[in-house]
Image: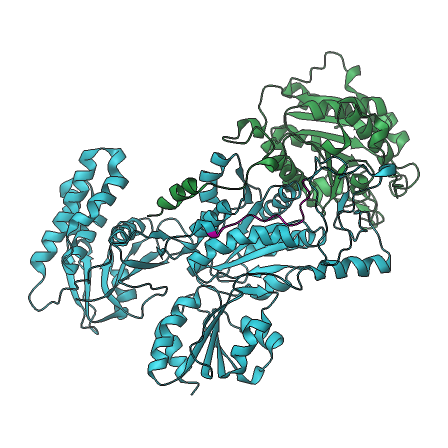
Amino acid sequence: MINQLSWKVGGQQGEGIESTGEIFSIALNRLGYYLYGYRHFSSRIKGGHTNNKIRVSTSQIRSISDDLDILVAFDQETIDLNYKELHDKGIMIADAKFDPKQPEDTNAVLFAVPFTEIATELGTSLMKNMVAVGATCAVLNLDIKVFEEVVQEIFGRKGQQVVDKNMEAIQAGFDFMKEKLSDNVELMELEKADGMKRLFMIGNDAIALGALAGGCRFMAAYPITPASEIMEYLIKKLPGLGGSVIQTEDEIAAVTMAIGANYAGVRSLTASAGPGLSLKMEAIGLSGITETPLVIVDTQRGGPSTGLPTKQEQSDLMAMIYGTHGEIPKIVLAPSTVQEAFYDTAEAFNLAEEYQCPVIILSDLQLSLGKQTVEPLDFSKVEIRRGKLVTEELPEIENKGYFKRFEVTEDGVSPRVIPGMKNGIHHVTGVEHDETGKPSESAANRNAQMDKRFRKVENIKFNTPVHKNAPHEEADLLIVGFNSTRGVIEEAMGRIEQDGIKVNHAQVRLIHPFPTDELLPLVKTAKKIAVVENNATGQLANIMKMNVGHAEKVYKLLKYDGNPFLPHEIHTKCKELF
Amino acid sequence: MATFKEFRNNVKPNWCPGCGDFSVQAAIQRAAANVGLEPENLAIVSGIGCSGRISGYINSYGFHGIHGRSLPIAQGVKMANRDLTVIASGGDGDGFAIGMGHTIHAIRRNVNITYIVMDNQIYGLTKGQTSPRSAAGFKTKSTPQGSIEQAISPMEMALTAGATFVAQSFSTDLKDLTALIEAGIKHDGFSLINVFSPCVTYNKVNTYDWFKENLTKLSDVEGYDPSSRELAMQTLMKHSGLVTGLIYQDTERKSYQELLSGYSETPLSQADLELDQAHFDKLAAEFM
């Protein structure tokens, strides 16, 4: 019996690789296993190698595994590109149709199963992925009944016959493979899971659901990888709440439309990836100087320019903090799990209204697209706070005076009225302005307004600015990361500890304003600090050095080849520091 | 009911004496009063340039954004509160150069707002460079040999983009301009009003006298019918775009908000932000 399994299915894009992984995962998730999926895909619709690596475990996992137990291949390229990940007792299950060749330098065994032929005999070659799922079940000694429910849900609307045929295909794959498995092949039987019902979702789902829960009722966005799922989810759900999503002509329209809607009192969102964020920068500055709430999601991907559009990277950090010209107060959040992505997105709308400034939710491709098992989300933790939004009637202002929308206050936050309110008329402009919004170039006013705006974010209240797992009062090593690296760091931590190195872990969730006070004690009590990030220049490490100091202890642990870190990479590199 | 005087505020415009934009300001104030608006129910969104300052010169909610982006901001405002009357405004550089993408798409999207372009065929605030509305051969600081680019024909362009309300006016025709803005506000959909608003400082070609000499009023064109797109196109071409009046109106096509499925009948800004637990549980269950 094993308590975790790593399974990968690969082939040409557009061949149903996605659905093969999906059916397999949903069924296992419902049995109570923890799943973690990562897709390797290209920026094209059909053709090009794609694969879906899925890890199954009886306990929570948030990282890709180092190696592979089973590789399901729909073409030779899948074998050639991936067989090295298989361990010695690994198994390849390949479609007999392409006459698969066993690579020489591996002990993993290849089984040719006529996926396409069996499927065609049963009615259509489209069912070849079902045959592959069945063949996998034989290796896992898993009763194919677990797929009945999922197959019914997916194909039920096409009629019972289609459902039956797909189940037959799974059975046929199972039977064929079972017969082929000889006595000297070890079955990979998983320990029984707890049967608990948990969510199975990608980070983008959680961001979109968090937006809904957080009162977002309008979104303006332009399609881009890996952010589009947020828009696609909200397009389905917002009309049910009276709201809407507009797919705009470009990224600038998306952000400025969201600014317009926020200004007029609706919690509004825009989401994009690096290229889109670059285009939105001027408007983010507008949100800053006009103190208009704005929530923006940046799902980071490989940059610069078009870069590696379908690959993992965390290189937008500096741009998100400092990207706009001029200086504005801004909040940058970086959830490190799918759960946090949900809660932080909901909270971002509160922060945007309370501090009347742009809030950027930083994600990365691995967090945004990695489909995984998620513990139930606690909706009671979500609250709606609208800051100094004026809702009561306002007194008349004499002589057509304007409402002091930008009143200089002690905490820097001014009362905010939205258009339509009687006696609340004021002007809003991206030009430096006085307390009523009228343009002003006076030096005294400039200082007063700049200082007021920055005062707002001096004491940001955010529940968990740093996720800490610090078992040691004095640590040999402090590992610091942000966004999706949380899972891989957690996994590596255990291994490093086994080497006798005392490790603490801090995952920074509030990137800006930087939580120096939260991090400093951990930094001071660590001999060395490894900052793990998917970029080439060590952006988080540099920000840490700038804010927290102790530069001599900081080591950059970087990866920017487009792929997420693997646990053994962190383990090895951390060990090398000692 | 508010009179046009109530749409005046106590800010003195920084436009040059004689600037065409003064009349546009007055026409908006009159039209707003004529259609029965209260100042708090009007939101004016403007771009950057001399004309962009207009949102600060009218006693209403005003949002002075960034260069070329008045239209998406204005559409966002309208989506948030369908009960507001929203006017987007700016110059020809704002709407037909840096913001041209938004102009075309706002036209085809047909959100129920009014867009007033103050068209002076030059960049005034930056002290005299060529605009996309400058005629070929037009000499400016940026085209010392005369412009070698073709001028944009915004009215023809709007018609081909699927506009439902296209009008053009001349800033001295205060009465006509006011009537057109009123009609634009009342139109259920996107209304584009291009106003020839001479720059007295930097444009020595397209002057008040030049327009008086070259403009044709559509009311003087025999048999003109603004419900015919074909006739509108023919007439514009015949007069090189130099016509004033209501050029085209499609009263059949519904606005974006009318066509939008599920969109709140009441202002979205008043929507309840809380979901109930049962609703949330249902949403979460879809991921199981």
Q: What coloring was used for the rendering?
A: by chain
Q: Residue furthest right?
A: B17
Quarter of the N terminus of chain A within the rendering:
bottom left
- The foreground one among A264 and A123 is A264
Q: Main secondary structure of the magenta part?
A: loop
Residue A310 visible in the picture = no
Magenta span of residues: A381-391
Q: Is residue A177 left or right of residue A236?
A: left
Residue at 44 percent across and 51 percent down: it is: A206
Q: Position of residue A503 (x, y in %)?
A: 42, 79
Residue A167 visible in the picture = yes
Q: Quadrant of residue A43?
A: bottom left
Q: Position of residue A377 (x, y in %)?
A: 41, 52
- The foreground one among A218 and A49 is A218
Q: Is B168 above or below relative to A152?
A: above
Q: Position of residue A314 (x, y in %)?
A: 50, 65
Q: Residue furthest top?
A: B223
Q: Position of residue B152 (x, y in %)?
A: 71, 37
Q: Is residue B235 left or right of residue A471?
A: right
Hue used for the chain lettered A: cyan
Q: Is residue A112 left or right of residue A475?
A: left
Q: Is residue A390 magenta?
A: yes
Q: Is B255 above or below relative to A502?
A: above
- The foreground one among A398 and B10 is A398
Quarter of the C terminus of chain A within the rendering:
bottom left
Write down which chain is painted green. Answer: B
Residue at 56 percent across and 65 percent down: it is: A511
